[in-house]
Amino acid sequence: MKTGSRHHRDGTSKKTQGNRVHKLSLLQKLLPLPWVLWPAEARLLLTLIAFWSIAGLLVLGSASWWVASREMGDGAYYIKRQLIWMTASWTLLGFSMSTNLRRWLNLAGPCVWIGCLLVGATLFIGTTVNGASRWLILGPLQIQPSELIKPFVVLQAANLFAYWKRISSDQKIFWLLIFGTLLLLILKQPNLSTAALVGILLWLMAMAAGLRFRTLIATALLGGLSGATSILINDYQRLRVISFLDPWQDPQGHGYQLVQSLLAIGSGGWFGEGFGLSTQKLQYLPIQSTDFIYAVFAEEFGFVGSLMLLLFLMLVAFLGLRIAIRCRNNKAKLVAIGCSTILVGQAIMNVAVASGVMPTTGLPFPMVSYGGNSLLSSLLIAGLLIRCSLESTELLSERQLKKIHY
């Protein structure tokens, strides 16, 4: 009886072990490279992106629950929709990690062209919200082309700047005109914040590629002049700048958003009010689920939580720099630099707006703010960054990789 029992236990344990091995092998087959060959930067970055996504859902749930209950009749309304987009976005991340970077670079040019056409279409048939035409309605979907085009701007900028000294003047002028047209179309929506972010991205990638300093200075001056012109032409942008300089001058009018955001951040103190216990999100703080979601976070987690958030962003930036250094060709280096700039730079700009360091803009916090377009764009960018890391250490040929037994 005892012998039979031992055999039964042995058989059960072997079956359980076999199931685990089978599940592990299925998981590893989904990876672009065996997990044991992943560089430390790629492993840590994937872990951080997963943590960022989950934490973002929790922060969004806290920021949106009360308003969703009042306006939609379902406190989980925004979370449910964000989960759907999160599933699609992580699928896209997996696809971007598994696809050769060369293929993405080849797709970049046509995608930038299509993106420019879609951004231009928003000026004629786009949906206008708060005076800005940034969205297109395609059946049940609402897309924001200026958000979705960001990964392909990074890729095409890498194509352009990586071999700047080798390509013809015609190609240089052509793509600089395309990028300039894109920026002007985004400004025309108007969407100064996204135009500024894309402009800074292109400028930093050009600087990383080693373009002449005089050219960079002239471009920076031209970009600053374009931004200033946009502010002078658009009344709402000018009022935002004025209210940014002294929001307390009109606390119930144009300075209301920033005043409420500063009150939320200041109310957090050292350790915050606690998760879910923000007061300002109870319809005092406007746009608390998107542009000003950091203010809710700061109120609930305080100075210490905000400091941890900034350290987290610094770690992501450090990993992006490490990946760029280890890349084996100029294009991959520039892609890594561009992806890191978008992810970390946009997050820091969102924090700066909510804390009154920058004028109020419409930039979401990547993987935290509500919105499917931002989520798709951010996780595609994260996947491209991880792919850069994987290709930097793919020292084995495909034939050798097929011989590895999981």
Image: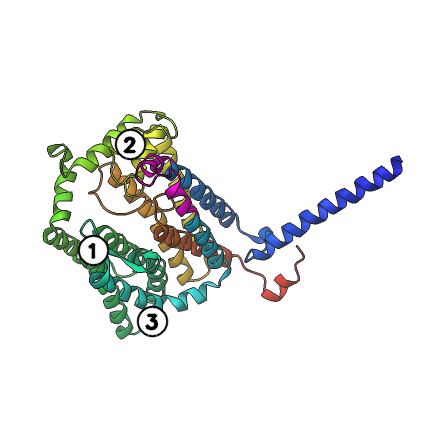
Circle on res. 282 = 2
Confirm whether the magenta stretch covers residue 36: no
The residue pinned by badge 1 equals: 220
Q: Earlier in the sequence, mark 2 or mark 1?
A: 1
Tell me the CA gap for discs 3 and 2.
57 Å
User: In this view of the protein, which residue sits in the foreground, 149 or 76?
Assistant: 76
Q: For mark 2, does the 10 Å Cα neighbourhood hold few (<14), some (14 to 19), or many (20 or more) residues? A: some
SS at mark 3 in the image: loop
Badge 2 vs badge 1, beta-carbon distance below 8 Å: no
Q: For the C terminus, which image quadrant?
A: bottom right
Instruction: Please provide the residue range marked out in magenta.
Output: 62-83
Q: Residue at coordinates 19% horizontally, 57% vertically from top-left?
A: 187
Q: Give the residue drawn at x 23%, y 67%.
A: 177
Q: Is residue 103 above or below residue 30?
A: below
For badge 2, the amino acid type reads: Leu
The amino acid at mark 1 is Ala
Query: Magenta segment, principal secondary structure?
Result: helix
Kindly identify which numbered label has been placed on residue 166. 3
- Mark 3 or 1: the one toward you: 1
| Magenta-span inclusion, residue 69 | yes
What amino acid type is highlighted by mark number 3?
Arg
